[in-house]
Amino acid sequence: MNKQLVQLLVLLFLVAVIVCVSYFNNSFRVPFSSEETHLAVAIHREIKYQFALITPMQYATEISYSSENKVLSVSVCAYYITDSTHEEIFDYYDNALQGNGWKPLYGAEDSGTFYGQYGGKIDRYEKDDLIAALLYGDENSDVEWIYGLCMTWDSMLEQ
């Protein structure tokens, strides 16, 4: 075969691969209505607003922040280091969250755990359809943060 014909066949093959990949990527996406997308954007805006109302503890250093909108779930989280004890952290955020209308879901004695291997602890709060979680790292774990505050909304929890 001549060189130009080989180049043309390679080009056609690459175009066919690109078309197939593009088609299959789009066919596996979950189609979201514009109403669902607008709702998630509004909830994301509300969570960011609620998160900003809770001032971090004095002398705490933020080491990580994330804000995500995945249409079906929305979250804002920040992780901090501090010399404060877990009790001081709980007292500060329990007052701040409840002072802004958040209701505890569980008492401190009923708090769940997360990352079982790390021995962390979590206190949960709710406000309307939103959940706030105060996460505590364990001094014996290899997490690099002492505590975190996350606010989330998940459409699956509403059903």
Image (spheres, rainbow, N blue to C red):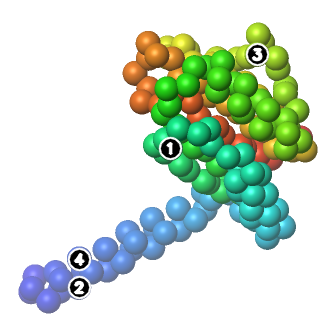
Which numbered disc flags the more N-terminal residue, 4 or 1?
4
Q: Amino acid at mark 3?
A: Ala
Q: Secondary structure at mark 1?
A: strand
Q: Which residue is mark 2?
A: 8
Q: Residue furthest top?
A: 109
Q: Which residue is mark 4?
A: 10
Q: Secondary structure at mark 3?
A: helix
Give the distance between the C-alpha atoms of the residues marked 1 and 2, in whole angstroms.
56 Å
Q: Secondary structure at mark 2?
A: helix
Give the distance between the C-alpha atoms of the residues marked 4 and 1, in whole angstroms.
52 Å
Q: Residues within 10 Å of mark 2 (few under 14, many from 20)?
A: few
Q: Which mark is residue 103?
A: none
Q: Which residue is mark 3?
A: 108
Q: Residues within 10 Å of mark 4 (few under 14, many from 20)?
A: few
In the rendered image, residue 106, in percent from the top left (x then y), is placed at: 82, 20
Give the distance between the C-alpha atoms of the residues marked 3 and 4, in whole angstroms.
65 Å
Q: Amino acid at mark 1?
A: Glu
Give the distance between the C-alpha atoms of the residues marked 2 and 4, in whole angstroms.
5 Å
Which numbered disc flags the more N-terminal residue, 3 or 4?
4
Q: Is residue 66 shown left or right of residue 2?
A: right
Q: Nearer the viewer, mark 3 or mark 4?
A: 3
Q: Nearer the viewer, residue 114 or 57?
A: 57
Residue positioned 76% across, 16% down in the render: 108
Q: Is residue 115 visible?
A: no
Q: Quadrant of the C terminus?
A: top right
Q: Which mark is residue 62?
A: 1
Q: Nearer the viewer, mark 4 or mark 1?
A: 1
Q: Is residue 106 above or below residue 156?
A: above
Give the distance between the C-alpha atoms of the residues marked 2 and 3, in whole angstroms.
69 Å
